[in-house]
Image: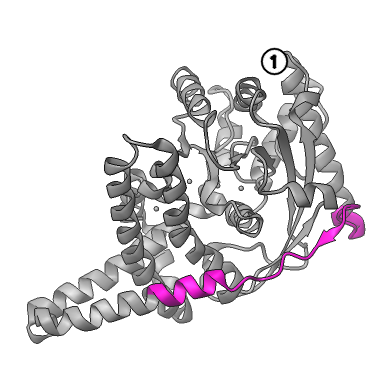
Amino acid sequence: MIPKRSFCLPSNLCLLFLSKPKARIALAAMAIPAVLAIVPIGVVFILSGLIVNLMQVVSFILLRPISKKLYRKINKVVAELLWLELIWLIDWWAGIKVELYVDSDTFQLMGKEHALVICNHRSDIDWLVGWLVAQRSGCLGSALAIMKKEVIGWSMWFSEYFFLERRWTKDEITLKSGFQQLEDFPMPFWLALFVEGTRFTQAKLMVAQEFAASRGLPIPRNVLLPRTKGFVSSVSQMRSFVPAIYDCTVAVPKNQPPPTLLRIFRGQSSVVKLQIRRHSMQELPETADGIGQWCKDVFVTKDALLEKYFAKGTFSDQQLQNIGRPMKSLIVVLLWSCLIGYGIFKFVPWSSLLSSWKGIAFSATFLVLVVIVMQILIHSSESERSTPLNITPQDQTKERLVQK
């Protein structure tokens, strides 16, 4: 609830874009309305990101050595100035409708307690849906995640996200250190973990089904098999100070295309359903094997819920909550747009940027780079580009299937 600002983009994505013809074709084939939207949105997003990063650097250098508590509180506010731009994209630009199903008691607790959040990874924007719900709960700036790599760069690093390398000898140390840092976190936080480890696709589902059949496990139909090692570590080390696990299930109606960042930039709306069940951390087993099995059982239940929904159209027995569409993200985007627009309006005449061919070429190059960077962001979020399932090296047939 999932992995790009003064743009610290993963170098492999940049190389992929420059070296892969498909990536260049994707940019060329992008619909004109999407390009027209991406340029102004991208300019505001990138320049505001640079400003936010600068504010974070200053507070990190000057405040964190004096008071980590004060630094975290200020960073929460500063980070939200950036994240709210993405909330605006969902709420106001594309009009994505998120239906939240959760019991009233849990709904009242959301944003008022620490929580470990686990979720199936159904669509390309599950992480944005998680941010939206966190924003409604008042903890967007303290919503964290365990991720495989940086996606929104420095802002996530300053906000204490966990970045893993998928090598357990290193990741175990990273997780342990990160959990220890969270013990004195001064505000309610959500730590999101997509335990499937990758986004759902039919190709990956086939591999998961073959693996489950070979091991005598329940055959999944709508989820992938959870990777429990990180979850076990999270529960074992945080159960003393994190009271709850939020078990989230995401579904997208079959009669609509799955939401993607490209569709959002095009202003195309969709519906996303989200169920949340709260589990007390103290109810989980004490042993590592028991915790891992608990996680597997949760995903069997998720699979049954999704199977029922896709077959009968009934999603959840939980109460549908009204989460509204607050004005805050709209106001923040308007303020950023006015600030950056005014800055550009003053800078261009002062610098005589458009009075020479060099200045015009520089401006055109900057706009092209904005489109490229935003396309990399979109391209990297696509399900087809997500991490393949871990399989044995000798099974080359499965490997080719997953990577299609």
Q: Height in image: 49 above or below 300?
A: below
- Residue lying at 16% horizontally and 73% vertically, measured from the top left: 362
- Residue lying at 61% horizontally and 55% vertically, measured from the top left: 138
Decide: few, some or many residues near mark 1? Use Cα within 10 Å; few <14, some 14-19, many ≥20: some
Image coords of residue 7 (percent x, y)? 32, 54
| Residue that numbered label 1 is attached to | 288
Image coords of residue 381 (percent x, y)? 51, 54
Element type where label 1 sits in the image: helix
Identify residue type, mark 1: Ala
Please say which color scheme the image uses.
Answer: one colour
- Residue lying at 9% horizontally and 86% vertically, measured from the top left: 355
Front residue of 56 and 257: 56
330 falls in the magenta region:
yes
Front residue of 247 and 167: 247
The part of the chain drawn in magenta is 309-336
Image coords of residue 5 (percent x, y)? 36, 55
- Residue lying at 55% horizontally and 75% vertically, measured from the top left: 93
289 on left or right of 5: right
101 falls in the magenta region:
no
